Amino acid sequence: QVQLVESGGGLVQPGGSLNLSCVVSGRTFSIFGMGWFRQATGQEREFVGGVSRNGGLVDYADSVKGRFTISRDNAKNTVYLQMNSLKPEDTAVYYCARDRTSVARRSPLGYDLWGQGTQVIVSS
């Protein structure tokens, strides 16, 4: 059974950085697009960004564009989310997810596997 395991969350001051990782088990990682989502308390899960199977197509939500960078290493079955210039409004549980296709779509309905999430808190 394919599993997704996120790591790298924590408490950081405004303006700081964090690098999240998501390791995917199994041998099919390179076939699928991968996305990052987040969910703040009392809010719906929202798209943060995504990367296509070969890394050639990357998409970001407007709220994180220019601050966050998504990348993937297919040899390591890992997708990353580098977060810079963090703001208090970035506080949320961050999830990685596997798209059903080779690209990474914005709707969570397009994803069939999810990690357990990692908490990010941006606060002074």
Image (cartoon, rainbow, N blue to C red):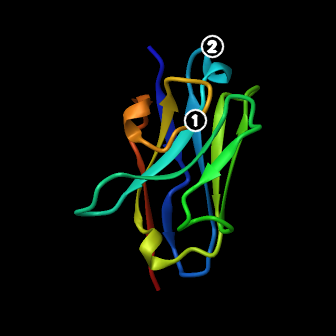
Residue type, mark 2 in image: Arg
* Residue at horizontal 42 percent and vertical 68 percent from the top: 91
Name the one closer to the observer, 46 or 11: 46
Quarter containing the N terminus: top left
Any mark on residue 27, and which? 2
Q: Earlier in the sequence, mark 2 or mark 1?
A: 2
**x then y, percent, for residue 87:** 51, 77
- Dot 1: within a 10 Å radius of its alpha carbon, few (fewer than 14), some, or many (20 or more) residues? many
**For numbered disc 1, what is the local secondary structure?**
strand
Q: Quadrant of residue 14?
A: bottom right
Residue type, mark 1 in image: Met
**x then y, percent, for residue 100:** 49, 23
Nearest-to-viewer mark from 2 and 1: 1
In space, the residues marked 2 and 1 are separated at their CA atoms by 15 Å
* Residue at horizontal 48 percent and vertical 19 percent from the top: 2
Residue that numbered label 1 is attached to: 34
Extreme residue toward the bottom, this view: 124
